[in-house]
Image (cartoon, rainbow, N blue to C red):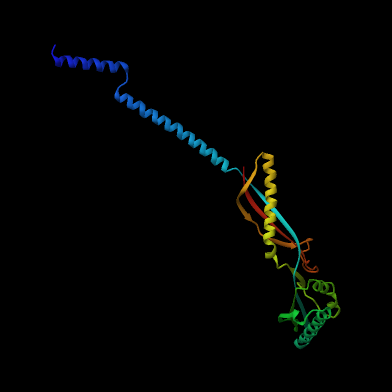
Amino acid sequence: MTDTATDMQQEMEREGARRKGGVGPTTTRWFGTAAIAAIGMTLGGYLLGDGLLRAKEAERSVTVRGLAERDVTADLATWTISYSASAANLAEAQGKVQRDTRAIEDFFRGLGFPADSLQPTGANVSSHTNRGVTTYTVRQRLALRTDNIELAQKAVANQFDLVGRGVFLEEGSGMSYTFTKLNDIKPEMVAEATRDARASAEQFAQDSGSGVGAIKDATQGYFSIEARDGDGGGWGKSDSPYKKVRVVTTVNFSLD
């Protein structure tokens, strides 16, 4: 047998041996690629699951509301006094209104109000004719404005003295009290409402075996100022100078 034939024979034997062992270069590469892909999928699945778990933990939170209330006393009193007089003669109706104006000014002066506390805010004249008779009505409005709440309450308590002086007070004449220093107490009340909200969150966390973390977000509600004892004023009833300020905040806390 020639050398060439011998070499060919040996190469065929080696190829046959490789085929019998089942591991060739192409097969080896395929298995390597598959192994790398399997490892990548396993690692990716772990990271994805761990990320979802962390995201789920980050979503754990509780939203609660906190309330803060405070009793205050109004620091401004205003009283719009409307009165009128009617007569068949315009000059007569005007004269009656002028006398009423002097009576009102004397009333407040006697209580101790400064002269500039009372200011005219408007007047009008109307007429109507019934069966050929014309009647004129003159209306006048005066406004009282004062920061002396005690003196304002005294005026309200004695307002029927005006009726005794012949002054006809129209509907809508009543004292109104206003609290103007809301901005001075806003920060403290917001802090108080937030503390109240945290207390509620801590109770919830305790019941669920968790801890309260930082504030995730918060929403401040509107401040409301109402009569402390429910008196809203109106015809025949004066407003109250004693007010209740109220605010509700909504806070979202993270849970540890």
165 or 128: nearer the viewer: 165
Task: Give 142 or 95, whichever is nearer the viewer.
Answer: 142
From the top left corner, tell me how far across and down residue 153 is, in percent. 81, 71
Image quarter of the N terminus: top left
Q: Is residue 3 above or below residue 87?
A: above
Image point (79%, 82%), residue name: 105
Which quarter of the figure has residue 58? Answer: top right
- The number of callouts visible is 0
The residue drawn where x is 17% and y is 14% is 6
State the residue at coordinates (64%, 52%). 250
Q: In the image, is 47 to the left or to the right of 112?
A: left
Q: From what the image shows, is residue 51 above or below residue 17?
A: below
Image quadrant assignment for residue 111: bottom right
Give the quarter of the figure containing the C terminus: top right
Residue sticking out furthest to the top? 1
Q: Is residue 195 visible?
A: yes
Of the pair 9 and 83, the residue shown nearer to us = 9
Q: For this view, does 55 lie left or right of residue 171?
A: left
Relative vertical location of residue 78 with respect to residue 67 in this rendering, above or below: below
Image height of 4 relative to 232, above or below: above
Q: Examine the rendering and report whether any part of residue 140 can be seen.
A: no
Residue 72 sits in quarter: bottom right
- Residue 139: x, y in percent? 74, 80
Q: What percent of the width, then of the height, locates residue 152?
A: 80, 73
Residue that protrudes farthest toward the bottom in the picture: 91
Q: Is residue 9 left or right of residue 247?
A: left
Closest to the observer: 95 or 53? Answer: 53
- Residue occupying the far front of the picture: 3
Residue 108 x/y as whole percent: 81, 79
